[in-house]
Image (cartoon, rainbow, N blue to C red):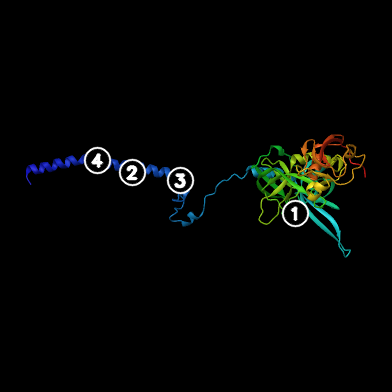
Amino acid sequence: MGFYDDMAHVEQKKRKQPGVGRLIMTSITSAVIGGMVVLLMLPTLSKSGYISMVEPGTANAMTNPAAKLFAQPISVEVNTATVEAVEKVEDAVVGVINIRRVVNWFNQESVTRGEGSGVIFEKKNGKAHIITNNHVIDDAEKVEVVLPSGDKVDAKVMGYDPFTDLAVLEIDGSKVTKVAELGDSSTLKVGEPAIAIGNPLGMEFSRTVTQGIISSLQRSMPIDVDQDGQDDWELDVLQTDAAINPGNSGGALVNIYGQVIGINTLKISKEGVEGLGFAIPINDVKAIVGQLMQYGQLKRPYLGIIPYDLTNVPRYHWKETLNLPDSVKAGVVIRDEVPKFSPAGQAGLRMYDVIVKLDGKEINNAAQLRKYLTLNKKPGDKIEITYYRDGFQKTTTATLTNPPQR
């Protein structure tokens, strides 16, 4: 190789050197950036379990495999709104025991015990008052209340009403530590949380808590009090999917603020049906409880008729006996003779008249008639009655009174 060839080779190497420098700088920069990214991602990778981070002075996870088997303790806040609501009201929910004697056909006597729930809503003058269902204490010879402490105390039935399925009990208040706050059921919305507290299947599962939502605000359940095949009352109820079982009757349905918004009363039990529980709205309960405590019963105004559902009358008699026009589809037939001096008698009503409206409101059955009188009228009030007689529509006005003394 000649001189000029050597010089050319040297010049060629000189021209290559700047490119090599740039390559080295790029590699160093990339390494620094990569290292910073890894450092920033270490906490995330550690939480995800891809790497194990140990503090200085502790055993390395590679040399101590047991270090990977234990999760780090996590602080969790358990004081949720539901927990707080339950804590606020649960000690005001009690057990109610119905005790009665039964004599069988061998003339042998036995004692039966039915168990339900109740809600303490008032404490004053050394006494505590409890709301429960009428069917919980029905036919009881003795009623006991089981407090949250486990103490059993005798209860006095202050009043009851089979149509609204409500009753009020009174107990000694010396051992009562909590009184429930009654809410406002008129402000409820479908979909808001609902908590049921009671004693499903008896005291063995006392103060069980279940949660769901308000499924409907307007349900009407027919009630046949005397089991004669004709509904006597339409009970307005809230529907919830919070689990309600036998023994929950009379217990509390509670909102997220720990206020009682309903008294649990029944559920639909059929194969394949779940989450259909019902509670009496607390505003209806408030309106009734006062009368039960004061009078022992609801003071219903007296009209003086024995109502019978038109839909239970054979179709043949709609035309041949009652002479009803085809436009009439439902109503209430006056079944028996009307007492002359009763409000209905004074208003000119007779047997076989068919009542279709009260104060302009359509009345389709006896349950609706009784319910309208109970919730909207009192003795001394006037009521406008629309009815059919011999095929003609008529209107009259009656002045309601107190029921006659028996």
Q: CA distance from mark 4 to mark 1?
A: 86 Å
Mark 4 or mark 3: which comes first in sequence? Answer: 4
Which amino acid type corresponds to the residue marked 1 in the rendered image? Met
Can you name the residue that lies furthest to the front here? Answer: 320
Q: Mark 4–mark 3 contact, CB under 8 Å?
A: no
Which residue lies under the disc numbered 4? 21
For label 4, the crowd category at 10 Å Cα-Cα, with few meaning under 14, some 14 to 19 and many 20 or more, is few
Identify which residue, 239 or 402, lies in the foreground: 402
Which residue lies under the disc numbered 1? 203
Q: Report the residue at 71% width, 39% height from top.
A: 185
Q: Position of residue 398 (x, y in %)?
A: 86, 36
For label 2, the crowd category at 10 Å Cα-Cα, with few meaning under 14, some 14 to 19 and many 20 or more, is few
Mark 1 or mark 3: which comes first in sequence? Answer: 3
Q: Mark 2–mark 1 contact, CB under 8 Å?
A: no
Which amino acid type corresponds to the residue marked 3 in the rendered image? Thr
Mark 2 or mark 1: which comes first in sequence? Answer: 2
In the rendered image of this protein, does residue 175 appear above or below residue 380?
Answer: below
Rendered image: mark on residue 31: 2
For label 1, the crowd category at 10 Å Cα-Cα, with few meaning under 14, some 14 to 19 and many 20 or more, is many
Rendered image: mark on residue 359: none
Please state if 344 lies on the left or on the right of 59 as rendered.
right
Which amino acid type corresponds to the residue marked 2 in the rendered image? Ala
Q: Is residue 195 visible?
A: yes
Q: Mark 2–mark 4 contact, CB under 8 Å?
A: no
